[in-house]
Image (cartoon, helix red, strand yellow):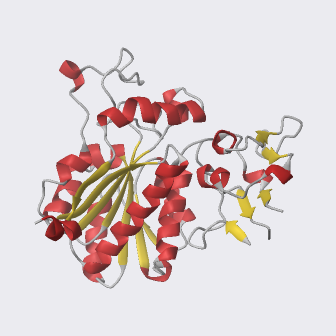
Amino acid sequence: MVVFKKPHALTETPFHYCPGCTHGIIHRLVAEALEALGLEGSTIGVAPVGCSVFAYNYFNCDMIQAPHGRAPAVATGVKRADPTKTVFTYQGDGDLAAIGTAETIHVGARAENITIIFVNNAIYGMTGGQMAPTTLIGQVTTTTPYGRKNDVQGSPIRVCEMLSTLDGVAYAERVSVDSVKNVLSAKKAIKKAFEIQSKGLGLTIVEVLSTCPTNWGLSPVKSLDWVREAMMPYYPLGVYKDVTKEGEQK
Amino acid sequence: MNKVTFKIDLCKGCGLCVNACPKKIVLLDDKQINAKGYHPACVLEMEKCIGCAMCATMCPDLVIIVEKGDK
């Protein structure tokens, strides 16, 4: 009995990512969630600019590639043109939290029924390891060679916390892919986000803490340790908003 | 018997599967070089495999297929 194989929602194209980059795991989790919900045939994905720009080669559903940061705006148009489709964007931290900050916030304010998969690895990957809005204080990047300083570059943005204050956001959860246990809970979170989207309750966002072994200058295994030791204290995992649970608490 | 199959030419030798295996039987084969130029992951003592699929869960490149045998 086969207990693990490639999901049908991914194509046969090999990933172009660096060795040990967890983009591959997150791609697979999105594909597995779509497959589990039977949404493969009725999903439209929006690829960003960044390392995951070639996401349209990897997913076996219809894909659009958006200009830098504009994936939520493109997804808004797609969803409004055909509300029966499941629409997701797959964005990195530079795309979502720097260039596309306005799009990200206003897609939440408008309560668009789309799902954002936000891959946070605290650095710009494709362009060569520059500081991102989510780069941690003290973290060395090519544009912060002495480490990021609070009084010069400001402090990192916590996207899930920020978006969860908006009424239009239905679901915001931060997950990680640093261990088998966390990968499995990340899969549940992504599946739940798609389920909430199908109920039409508002914007759903899943932030995934990811790695960048190449630009962090660490081995793939040590990168996972760095996610646990350095990123998780600043970006705590958990559900920041869930409208399906709010009724139960009252 | 449980069986783990590696699509060797997709492997980038990152070692996340080696780190994830609870039985410590996955290793990078330093006697072999694949088409991408890496030492691919392999299992030499397949009889020790418990079919937990932890290696495949952590593999970013979908190299691994896990099959669980009948008891």
Give percent across and percent down for residue B52: 67, 56
Give percent across and percent down for residue A209: 41, 44
Task: Give the quarter of the figure containing the C terminus of chain A.
Answer: bottom left
Residue A15, placed above or below residue A122? below
Residue B44, placed above or below residue A130? below
Q: What residue do we see at 58% from left, 47% from top?
A: A17
Residue A29, placed above or below residue B34? below
- Indicate left or right for A201 with A78 as reference: left
Is residue A41 shown to the viewer in this render? yes
Give percent across and percent down for residue A26: 49, 55
Q: What residue do we see at 21% from left, 74% from top?
A: A201
Q: Nearer the viewer, residue A170 or A122?
A: A170
The answer to which image quadrant residue B20 occupies is: top right
Is residue A61 shown to the viewer in this render? no
Which residue is at the far right?
B31
Q: What residue do we see at 73% from left, 55% from top?
A: B50
Task: Give the quarter of the figure containing the N terminus of chain A.
Answer: bottom right
The answer to which image quadrant residue A42 occupies is: bottom left
Which residue is at the far top?
A146
- Indicate left or right for A13 with A35 as reference: right
